[in-house]
Image (spheres, grey):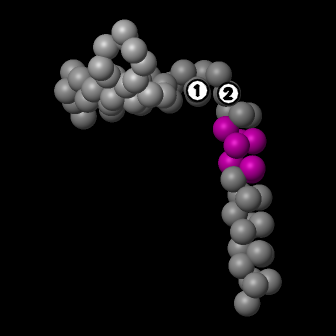
Amino acid sequence: MTKQKGQGDMSVREAGRLGGEARKEELGPEGYSKLGKQGGEARKQELGPEGYSELGQKGGHRVRELIDKGKSAE
C-alpha cells in the first residue's frame, strides 16, 4: 500500500515493520521461545498422536517424490 492524503506520512509496510521491531524488543529471544512452545503445545492438543503421525507420513511421501524426481533427472 502507498501513502494516502490526510492519513499521516507512514505507509502500512513501515507501520508493520516498526510494530514488529517494537514487539521484538518487548519479547526478546526468551519471549519468542516461550511463544513458540505455547503454539506447539496448542497444536499438539489439536492434532493428537494420530495427527502427528499423518503429518509425518505426508512429509515422508514428499521427500520420496523429490528423491525420485532427482534420480530421474540424472
Which residue is rendered at x = 31% and y = 14% of the image?
A: 8
Query: Please, which residue is most extreme toward the top here?
Result: 6
When the figure is inspected, residue 72 is found, relative to residue 16, above or below; the finding is below
How far from the left and from the top, in percent, is residue 6? Answer: 37, 9
From the viewer's perspective, is 54 left or right of 31?
right
Which residue is rendered at x = 70% and y = 43% of the image?
A: 55
Label 1: which secondary element: helix
How far from the left and from the top, in percent, is residue 28? Answer: 22, 30
From the viewer's perspective, is 29 left or right of 4?
left
Range of magenta residues: 52-58
25 or 32: which is nearer to us?
A: 25
Residue denoted by label 2: 47
Label 2: which secondary element: helix
How far from the left and from the top, in percent, is residue 43? Answer: 58, 26
In the picture, residue 13 is in which quadrant? top left
57 or 30: which is nearer to us?
A: 30
Badge count:
2
Residue denoted by label 1: 43
In the picture, residue 18 is in which quadrant? top left
Which residue is rendered at x = 73% and y = 59% of the image?
A: 62
Mark 2 nearby-residue class (10 Å; few <14, some 14–19, many ≥20):
few
| Badge 2 amino acid | Leu
From the viewer's perspective, is 72 left or right of 38?
right
- Give how far apart the Cα atoms at labels 1 and 2 are: 6 Å
Image quadrant where one finds the C terminus: bottom right
